[in-house]
Amino acid sequence: MLRRATRLIFLLLLGILNDVARLSAQEIPHLDRATGSTQLIVGGKPFLILGGELGNSSAGTAAQADEILPRLARLHINTVLMPVAWEQVEPIEGKVDFTILDHWIEQARAQNLHLVLLWFGSWKNAVSSYTPEWVKKDPKRFARAVSSDGHPLDILSTFSKGNLNADTRAFQALMRHVKEFDSERQTVLMVQVENEVGILGSGRDHSAEADRLFSTPVPDALMQPLRAHRDRLSPELSRSWNEKGRNWQEAFGERASEVFMAWNYARYIGEVAAAGKKEYSLPLFLNAQLPAPFERAGEYPSGGPHPYFLEVYRAAAPTLDFFSPDIYWPNFEYWIERYNEQGNPVFVPEARLDSGPMNAFYAYGEARAFGFSPFAVDSIPDVPATLAAEKSPLAESFSIFEQLADILPQAQRDGRTRGLVLHVTSPRPTQTVSLAGYLFTATLARSWPERKILQDDGAMIVVQTGSDEFLIGGSALTVTVTKDVDLGDGIAGIESVEEGSRNGGQWKTERRLNGDQSNQGRNVSLPAHEFKLLRVKLYTIPQR
Ligand code: DGJ
């Protein structure tokens, strides 16, 4: 009797466990913001996006999917960021057609790739060139922003209900369709709503409606959250904010035009996003074109989700899950860290392809990004599958992260990762990161005996895997290890360095490095012109 009851309970528990497993496999992709770094959860598990964004004109036909996606899959990219153009999916008002997108989704599945969709709706790089013909040709219904000298711009106005309603309907249709077509398989992970928005020319729209609103009081819906979060405002916003100001100019001084536009873009995009999210609640985000050094608002798109105004965006567009930098300027570390604040998840949808293989080490290791995606990856020339990893720096670099993907998200969350990138032009020739009581000091690798720098850039990620054990991946660096005296006494030494690979969680040693390959045990060497993964064991002995 008792036995049968125990068996019954056991079967019941098994059933519940099965249900839990099935449900978590069916959970749609979402962000887990528990302490530490935010993670993207796919099929119930953290997923590290090894991304690549397509060129702007690469996703317009079905045939392009067949040619491009197999190539990208060979480069250790696991997620492709692809445009979905409003003009293409709704060429006739009210008649949406997602045939081409469906083919991309199917081809992505065949290549074991995921997709992030980029909604090129009302705006792409500030202007409205991806809007359908019926929008472009009807400026009465679909009002445009106006320049400071009174001319209509190629930029849809944020103040027009006609614009907002039409974009919202199209985006809703997209999200509804993706849900129907893909929620079972979950090939599509996230959606970017619009692309690099903002006003070009002067700092703000000068239409009659914009002028009128600019001289009215700043809405409480903005002032309240700014007051509530005054301790986390960016220096730029807090410096210019006068909470007693009666209109936008008084309230935000020299930043007034930008804050005004940020508020109005965010409200518009927030509404588009909310309508889409109601259909299918994938993570939604927006990217920013970052100011070049010394550029003024209007030279870069004014009112975009720049780090200065994220608080404005959060207040107006709470449905957007995060904001992302497109980093083309050399100070990669500065810009990524500006978005690594106030719980904003770190995801870089666009970055330079040439420096991408190195910057990836900083992004995943130091900024604890859940995704990083160089731009125009389809421009990488194809190579046979057997050679792909050796022939493309991006593939080589991503192959390191692919090997770490099962342990990296947890290590990011626990603070067990560090990363750095060095250039011949870096203001300091050496850089040091501290982890688990050790200091890892890197310099660019040099030849011996000439002592010439072998490669202009080097990078590494350090992941702590045991109390004195680390995986170090990267390229072109010489790393010395010392005790972090701020964290404890003793003298550090290198016990062993192995070069190898990880597969299915198992480490495989391919070479033990010593002698000339470790400068007689003095340092850890990441060779130039290739990317390597090393398992490094360290030890500490008392000082005397
Ligand atoms: C940033 C944009 O978001 C991309 O679509 C592309 O135009 C690049 N700039 C530049 O090639």
Image: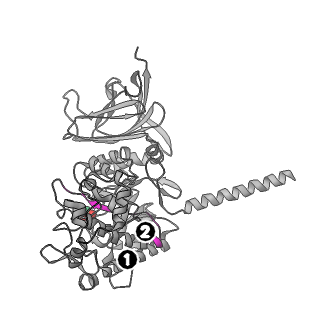
What kind of element bears circle 1?
A: helix
Q: Which mark is residue 32?
A: none
Q: Is residue 53 visible?
A: no
Which numbered disc, 2 or 1, marks the residue closer to the eye?
Answer: 1
Residues marked 2 and 1 touching at CB (< 8 Å)? no
Choose top left, top right, bottom left or bottom right for residue 294. Answer: bottom left
- Type of amino acid under label 1: Thr
| Residue depicted at x 40% and y 28% | 487
| Residue depicted at x 31% and y 41% | 420
Q: Mark 2 or mark 1, which has the lower sequence index?
A: 2
CA distance for labels 2 and 1: 23 Å
**Among all residues in the image, which is located at the extreme top?**
544
State the count of labels. 2
- Residue nearer the viewer, 194 or 186: 194
Specify whether residue 279 is painted magenta.
Answer: yes
- Type of amino acid under label 2: Ile
View quadrant of ligand 1: bottom left
**Among all residues in the image, which is located at the extreme right?**
1
The residue carrying mark 1 is 168
- In the image, residue 31 above or below residue 170: above
- In the image, residue 483 above or below residue 273: above
What kind of element bears circle 2?
A: helix
| Residue depicted at x 52% and y 59% | 43
Density class for disc 1 (Cα within 10 Å; few <14, some 14-19, many ≥20) is many
